[in-house]
Amino acid sequence: MEFVMTADADDLDYGSISVLLGALHARKISASELLAHTIARIEALDGKINAVIVRDFDRAKDAARAADAALGRGERQPLLGIPVTLKEPFNVAGLPTTWGFPHFRDFKPEEDALVVSRLKAAGAIIIGKTNIPIGLRDFQSYNDIHGTTNNPWDLGRSPGGSSGGCGAALAAGFGPLSIGSDIGGSIRVPSHFCGVFGHKPSLGLVPLRGYSLPPAPPVPGQGDLAVVGPMARTASDLALALDVIAGPDETRDGIGYRLALPAPRHDQLKNFRILVIDTHPLMPTGDAVRSAIGRLAKRLERSGAGVARASTSLPDLAESARLYMKLLNAARSPRLTPAALAEAQGLAAALSPDDRSLQAERARGWGMIHREWLATDAARLQLQQRWQLFFREFDAVIYPTAAVPAFPHDQSEPFDARQLDIDGKLYNYSDACFIWADPASTCGLPATAVPIERTATGLPIGVQIIGPYLEDRTTIALAGLIEREFGGFVPPPSLPAM
């Protein structure tokens, strides 16, 4: 059958998954034409952005032709014919997986990550991988293999990290869905910096098989703190994608368990009980972010939502942040060489017991023995219990995603010497960036990033919505209501329609 492309150009550049599926089902466009449009846009615009750094266009064209045949037979799948990008560390058979490390440049896995298999089974067309920082360690996205990814809103600024390539690709119109990962805000920060939506799922909700540092075999298992999740340009697309990729690994927990997430707590803003937090006891929030959150709180109140600005039920955010910094570096410590581990343990041993700084807690985390980790994990379990009690009083927390909008590129070394400018005052880069990943990362809670407005200079500002464990549908639903009432994604004005 011959197709004549009649779908609106704006929809092809920035349409939601549902809009694009509607065009495919109505035969306004074929999957092959949609893919060709997306490829042409990447080839025309990605030179300056550098988001899609591993391209699989030939196999994508084969997949699009297969999708057209399936659509012609009347088949309907959640992502049939939809172009999708993935963060670089996800294994895709035959494509390199490097995590940004030059010594893994030639590593090519033989099988897809489980998440990739699920996307393909739902009809998605994998078009390529997006850029990251080396070792996923940064709130920028650059490495010696693929260079620097720039923010489509301002090429001199970071798109965030470590899923920065995902955020930049979505903002640039390189497909409606990208899959990222998050241990320290790596989905949420790029969403905030690039003005898109992202969802950090509850810990363990999406399986990690095939998402591991090369050359580790793709075995089932659950990491500590780390999750993988969807990024998109609408909240409804987050919900759709999460339904596709969530659920226990069929070769492990899935043998005996099935996923049954609860429905959203509410479907109207007026029924939500929301705690709005705009600062942190250990770190200031920049005026642009803080004032935007204040305006959002007022809009929510006018919509009838129950909004509080403080609560005695809120767990201690300072203690939670200290706990998180230890757990974060403990989770990353297997990457240390024996010499680096010995050095880290020596530095931790020299710390004063009274030093409760975030830098000190990270230093302690690098070299913890198992006995110390168990004590830290026990403290986390107590904290999780306090959050469970808190969510009897509230449905969600609106919380800063970062202290500032997208900041200028800073690739200076050593990493630990970097500083971040917050309203003219400099703060330790790691402290100022990582602190906002807690408490959702520490306690395994779901957190949905949603854009809310832009600065006077046009940079996006977003927030994260934190909810109860495994109530991911609630945070995504609230993000969707905010999107509907107050606006969501808008394209960067500098990017042309194709």
Image (cartoon, rainbow, N blue to C red):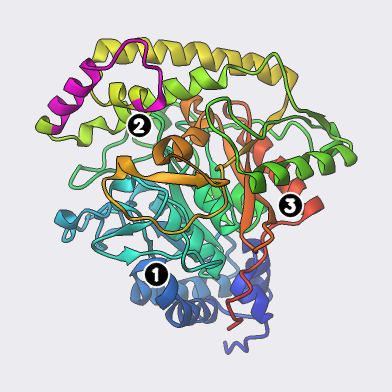
Mark positioned earlier in the residue sequence (2 or 1) = 1
Q: Which residue is at 89% across, 41% downward?
A: 302
> Can residue 268 be seen from the camera position used here?
no
Q: Residue at x 53, y 17 (%)?
A: 384
Q: Is residue 342 magenta?
A: yes
Picture coordinates of residue 383, whole percent (x, y): 52, 15
Label 3: element kind: helix
Q: Give residue 165's position: percent from left, percent from top.
A: 43, 60
Say if 316 sits above or below 159 in the image: above
| Numbered label attached to residue 483 | 3
Asked if marks 1 and 3 touch (Cβ < 8 Å), the reply is no
Residue beneath the point at 43% across and 38% down: 184
Query: Between marks 1 and 3, how big is the CA–CA gap?
Result: 28 Å
What label does residue 50 carry, if any?
A: 1
In the rendered image of this protein, does residue 23 appear above or below residue 324? below
Mark 1 is on which residue type?
A: Asn
Q: Quadrant of residue 63?
A: bottom left
Q: Contact, CB < 8 Å: mark 3 with mark 2? A: no
- Point out the stretch of residues depicted in magenta: 340-359
Q: Nearer the viewer, mark 1 or mark 3?
A: 1
Q: Residue 223's mark?
A: 2
User: In the rendered image of this protein, does residue 197 appear above or below residue 267?
Assistant: below
Quarter of the image with the N terminus is bottom right
Disc 3 or disc 2, which is closer to the eye?
3
- Main secondary structure along the magenta-highlighted residues: helix
- Upstream in sequence: badge 3 or badge 2: 2
What secondary structure is marked by label 2?
loop
